[in-house]
Amino acid sequence: MKSWKQVSLLSLCVIILMASTSGKPAWQMKADYVEACSCHLFCPCYFNKHAEHPHCEFNMAVKVREGYSGNTNLAGAKYWLTGDLGDEWGTNKKGEWVVVSFDPSTNKEQRDALAPMILKTYGLQWGELKVQEAPIEINRAGDVVSASLGGGQMASMKLKREGGADGKGVVLRNVKYFGAQNNDGFEMYRSLEHSANVQGHKFSYSDRNAFLISIDTHEGESGGMSGSK
């Protein structure tokens, strides 16, 4: 009888442990992106293994809408990615360079949690990776979205929404955003200004690809882009 009770107690502990550890990923976030790159609209990287040029130079201004990693709350955290995908991102999963900038309001715990999440979302090995701190501003006025890094001295974007045939905007759906498992569609924009001068790298473009997108990414198998398969 005593042996039966011990087995029953052990089984109950296993069931409780399984219930407490299953169903919830170790990390998850929903984030809103403002993004522009050097390709013309729409960026062919999402359907091919190479960019329009031997490079795809980009700015991404990101604000986390909600999310967590362990016990760290990520809501409201802001970061900015500036870099170049290069010419091997789709064939060898290698990116040329990237600079990750955190807004001063993003605390150390959030930064430590976000760093591996960012790398997981893009799934690339970067030839050069640097991290810095700089103020991030994102503003929207009607059909124009503006974003700046370091007061615009390090990077900036000024984007205008594509109206489409009915003037209500264009949204591209059912297309993966890198390794994020879900997104709400690419809201098409075109760059009026898209530039960077950061950590020894400098570029400037206009009338190029841009979009707004909200992604949902979490621990587990990534979604993957069409061209990277």
Image (cartoon, rainbow, N blue to C red):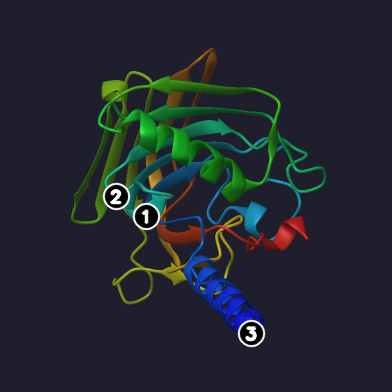
- Label 1 secondary element: strand
Q: Is residue 10 above or below residue 46?
A: below
What residue is pinned by disc 2? 75
- At x 60%, y 47%, the residue is 120
Is label 1 in contact with label 2 (beta carbons under 8 Å)? yes
Q: Amino acid at mark 1?
A: Gly
What residue is pinned by disc 3? 4
What residue is pinned by disc 1? 67
Q: Nearer the viewer, mark 3 or mark 2?
A: 3
* Foreground pick, 2 / 145: 2
Q: Is residue 23 above or below residue 38?
A: below
Q: Earlier in the sequence, mark 1 or mark 3?
A: 3
Residue ranking furthest to the front: 1
- Label 2 secondary element: loop
- Image quadrant assignment for residue 48: bottom right
Task: Provide residue 17's location: percent of width, then percent of height.
Answer: 53, 68
Q: For marks 1 and 3, give the CA distance.
A: 44 Å
Mark 1 Cα within 10 Å, few/some/many (few <14, many 20+)?
Answer: many
Task: Provide residue 114's location: percent of width, then percent of height.
Answer: 46, 40
* Foreground pick, 207 / 141: 141
Residue ranking furthest to the top: 200
- At x 65%, y 37%, the residue is 85
Q: Earlier in the sequence, mark 1 or mark 2?
A: 1
User: In which quadrant will I find the C terminus?
Assistant: bottom right
Locate residue 141 relative to residue 184 in the image: left or right. Answer: left
